[in-house]
């Protein structure tokens, strides 16, 4: 009998709470908690300004999009990671439900041991730094909408890496 084919390993990555400190290697947490607002519009509006800087290189421009993501069931298989080397990408929820953020540091394509998962509190968004590997937007419970601010323009700003191992998101 011949040798059996090598089977991929199975990984379960548990989500941890999203905090500014823990998420720093990947980007910025977008939230008003802990920020001092500036009162504008004759005192009728609290502005929480400069929560993150939007980065664009190679002549790119910022764009604002609306994403609508179907809900997933957990455990959820993480099959692909993507990266945008020429600009940052921000996701801000229009709902008030927790959602997972799957990331890995910039650099070579990530393996299962490089991936981290953060769970927002429902009032937080994220701004991913250029080159950070991430999974596409995931939603829990029900279809959800997000405002996305990222780079538009020429240049190769999309890299994709398909994971060979079985990697699952666990909450």
Image (tube, grey):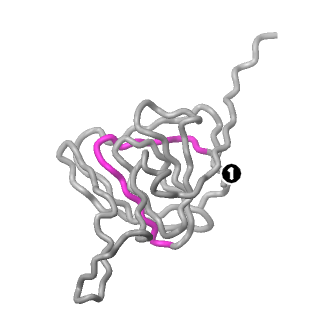
Q: Is residue 158 above or below residue 95?
A: above
Please, what is the dominant secondary structure of the magenta stretch? strand
Which element carries disc 1, helix, strand or loop?
Answer: loop
- Say which quarter of the image contains residue 150: bottom left
- Residue located farthest toward the right when viewing the structure as drawn: 1
Q: Position of residue 84 (x, y in %)?
A: 35, 43
Q: Is residue 59 above or below residue 38?
A: above
Pointer 1 residue:
75
- Say which quarter of the image contains residue 51: bottom left
Q: Does the magenta portion include 67?
A: no
Q: Is residue 25 above or below residue 140?
A: above
- Residue located farthest toward the left when viewing the structure as drawn: 59
Residue located at (47% from left, 46% from top): 134
Count of numbered circles in the view? 1
Residue located at (39% from left, 65% from top): 147
Indicate the quadrant containing the N terminus: top left, top right, bottom left or bottom right.
Answer: top right
- Near mark 1 (Cα within 10 A), the count class, few <14, some 14-19 or many ≥20, is some
Q: Is residue 129 left or right of residue 138?
A: left
Q: Is residue 48 above or below residue 9?
A: below
Q: Position of residue 71 (x, y in %)?
A: 59, 62
- Say which quarter of the image contains residue 54: bottom left
Q: Position of residue 131 (x, y in %)?
A: 37, 41
Q: Position of residue 19 (x, y in %)?
A: 50, 58
Residue located at (76% from left, 13% from top): 3
What range of the chain is rendered magenta? Answer: 78-95
Residue located at (30% from left, 47% from top): 87
Indicate the quadrant containing the C terminus: top left, top right, bottom left or bottom right.
Answer: bottom right
Along the viewing direction, whichever of 21 and 88 lies nearer the viewer: 21
Q: Is residue 113 left or right of residue 26?
A: right
Q: Does the magenta portion include 80?
A: yes
């Amino acid at each position: 009998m011949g040798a059996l084919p090598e089977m991929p390993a199975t990984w379960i990555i548990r989500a941890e709470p999203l905090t500014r400190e823990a998420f720093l290697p990947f980007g910025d947490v977008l939230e008003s908690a802990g920020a001092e607002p500036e009162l504008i519009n004759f005192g009728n509006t609290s502005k929480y300004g400069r929560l993150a800087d939007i980065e664009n290189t190679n002549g790119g421009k910022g764009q604002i999009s609306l994403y609508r993501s179907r809900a997933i069931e957990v455990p959820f298989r993480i099959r692909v990671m993507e990266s945008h080397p020429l600009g940052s990408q921000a996701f801000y929820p229009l709902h008030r439900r927790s959602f997972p953020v799957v990331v890995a540091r910039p650099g070579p394509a990530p393996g299962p041991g490089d991936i981290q998962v953060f769970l927002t509190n429902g009032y937080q968004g994220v701004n991913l730094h250029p080159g950070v590997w991430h999974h596409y937007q995931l939603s829990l419970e029900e279809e959800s909408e997000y405002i996305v601010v990222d780079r538009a323009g020429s240049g190769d700003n999309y890299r994709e890496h398909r994971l060979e191992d079985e990697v699952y998101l666990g909450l």
